[in-house]
Amino acid sequence: MARIAVIGAGMGALAAAARLAVAGHRVAVYERTDTYGGALRRFERDGFSFDTGPGLLPLPAVYRDLFVKTGKEPLERCVELVQVDPSSRHVFADGTRVSLPNASRAGVVAALDEALGPGAGQRWGDFLVRAREAWDRTRRPLLEEPLWPNWQVLAEREPYPSVPHKRLLRTRRAGTLAEVGAWELRDPRLTALLEGYALAQGLDPRVTPASTAVLPYMEHAFGIWYVRGGMRELARAVYERCVARRVEFRFGAEVTGVLEKDGRASGVELADGTVAEADSVVAGVAPGVLDRLAAGHAVRGDGEVPAQRATASRLTVLLALRGARPEGTAHRTVVHTQDREAELAALFGTAAGNAHPTVTVLRPDDPHLAPADHESVTLTAAVPARPDESYGALAEDMISAAERAVPGLRDRLLWHEVRTPAHIAEATGAAGGAVPVPALAAAGGRLLHPSNSTRVPGLFTVGGWAHPGGGLPHAGMSGALVAGLIVEGPDFRGSR
């Protein structure tokens, strides 16, 4: 039985802790805040309840596997999973609206043809076929296996099989998501649909590789899910599974250093001066925090994937509305920007704020979230990772955009609460409140994340800032990969 010290109680760290405890190790988690879940937080006021982190769950199989591998109770006995249908409703700049069914390629094709005109659905369907090929080529190395030592192969090869396109007397292939939209989808509304998946991650579609096509493919192929009571319930269930497996938790325990002995990680030092010895240390922290904790030790070496410095964050506006949720309301509506260029310039350029952003409106059909005959609504938009910026005007812009999806919104509004990048920074420790993106192939490795192993024997990294990157499924897989590396050693080749 080895002693494992886990720094942080984010979802990746919790997943690793549960798996390591089941393998017979003695696991202690040290969390500087007073609760678990990382970005999966909850805000409550006047009987209203809101998720302030991710509001939906793609690829629930990751957490089903976690619960199967760590106990007799499956995930569905611990939380109520609800498949969201339609998966999303879209309001485009020209006023066109379309609802897309969950996990049904044929249904999506038919819906797009009806809303956007004949041929639109077929073009999107053909795109999903190509996206599936990119998924099949990258699924294991980017989600289910430790990062390859020859990771440069993933950085150099574009797995998306783009269609040849004649341009200026030359035949070219799309290398970016924006080019896929312009050359293969050939409809500004389909392009907005595609680019929305990048924008939701804080990625610029003009430079994001075509391999980002795997993000819409994952959703269309495996569906999108909600946890009854709010996504915070998923964090609760994973935490309780850890407790049931005798993982020890210490909240309000800030780790100030990773100890080393004989060239190997040997424990952690806490802010109160106490030392916790360990045979291995698992760090679920942002890159800058890890560098500080391992001061004097070279965590990453030349030729390895460098720590990613994400520049985008998330602004969340929580709306308490009087009146019940109308029958037939979509759980998720994406209100696309009416000025794409202004949005991109504000988010990825030098302009302050974020002009007319694409806004995701979440309206769960969940009586646990609001008093009777009232409704909790959550708005999110990508913003630059600048926690000291004032976001009042942008929050008002988001509410105005949401009125296109929620008729009479301002007349129903009791109050609203704004959660800024500063709140994310406080919860996760990430500089600027930056939100990590999922690992993606191509782009010279710019969107890969560092290996879960480090140059310091016995020190491992887990969570959104380590391989395979940000997002709930990826966090869960990072926990599985770290547990595999510790239990089976460096010959571990990934999830089966």
Image (tube, helix red, strand yellow):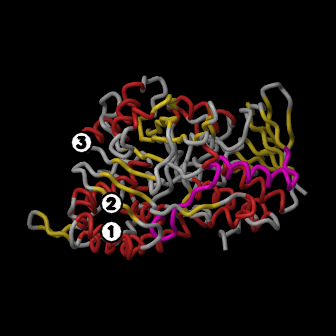
Residue in front for this viewpoint, 386 or 325: 325
Q: Which mark is residue 98?
A: 2
Q: Quadrant of residue 118?
A: bottom left
Q: Which of marks 2 and 3 is in front?
A: 2
Q: In this view, does 289 lie above or below 212?
A: above
From the image, tell me which residue sits under label 3: 339
Q: In which quarter of the image is residue 245?
A: bottom right
Residue 384: percent from left, percent from top: 41, 35
Position of residue 395 in the picture relative to residue 491 (left or right): left
Residue in front for this viewpoint, 215 or 441: 215
What is the number of callouts on the image? Answer: 3
Q: Magenta segment: does it hold 74?
A: no
Residue 457: in sight, yes or no? no
Q: What stretch is highlighted in magenta?
A: 219-248
Residue 52: percent from left, percent from top: 57, 40
From the image, tell me which residue sits under label 1: 111
Can you say which quadrant of the picture contains the C terminus?
A: bottom right
Q: What residue type is labelled 3?
A: Asp
